[in-house]
Amino acid sequence: MIGFLFNDRECRELDYVLRKELEEMLFDLNDQRMDHDIKTAIETRYKVIFRMYARLASPRDISRYARNKVHR
């Protein structure tokens, strides 16, 4: 495990970057033209990014990006 020390500005920047990445992946996952294999790869990456975001964000903000388990 690697630990990081961030100041307040760096935490806000990381929060912003993670939110934008989650939004982009949600957009891609909702695209019906996307291939199933690509969606599977995006879903795997989404889980990792979401867990990172969950360490920084409030429960209210986290709920905005939570997905259903059965989402295809």
Image (cartoon, rainbow, N blue to C red):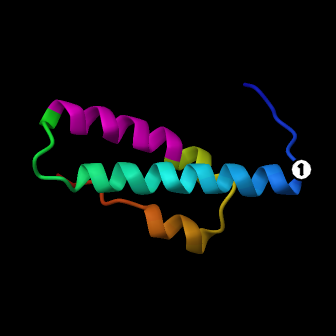
Is 33 rendered above or below residue 60?
above
Q: Main secondary structure of the magenta part?
A: helix
Which residue is outermost to the top? 1
What residue do we see at 60% from left, 69% from top? 59
The amino acid type of the residue labelled 1 equals Asn
* Residue 36 picture quarter: top left
Q: Is residue 62 left or right of residue 32?
A: right
What residue do we see at 86% from left, 57% from top? 8
Say if the magenta span includes residue 46.
Answer: yes
The answer to which of 26 and 43 lies nearer the viewer is 26
Q: Residues within 10 Å of mark 1 (few under 14, many from 20)?
A: few
Badge 1 is on which residue? 7
* Residue 34 picture quarter: top left
Say if the magenta span includes residue 36.
Answer: no
Q: How many marks?
A: 1
* Quadrant in which the N terminus is drawn: top right
What residue do we see at 69% from left, 49% from top? 14
Give the x, y percent position of residue 29: 25, 50
Give the x, y percent position of residue 68: 30, 60
Q: Is residue 59 left or right of residue 47?
A: right
Say which element carries label 1: loop
Which residue is outermost to the bottom? 60
Give the x, y percent position of residue 11: 77, 52
* Residue 56 picture quarter: bottom right
The answer to which of 65 and 27 lies nearer the viewer is 27
Q: Which residues are magenta?
A: 37-49
Give the x, y percent position of residue 16: 63, 56
What residue do we see at 80% from left, 49% from top? 10
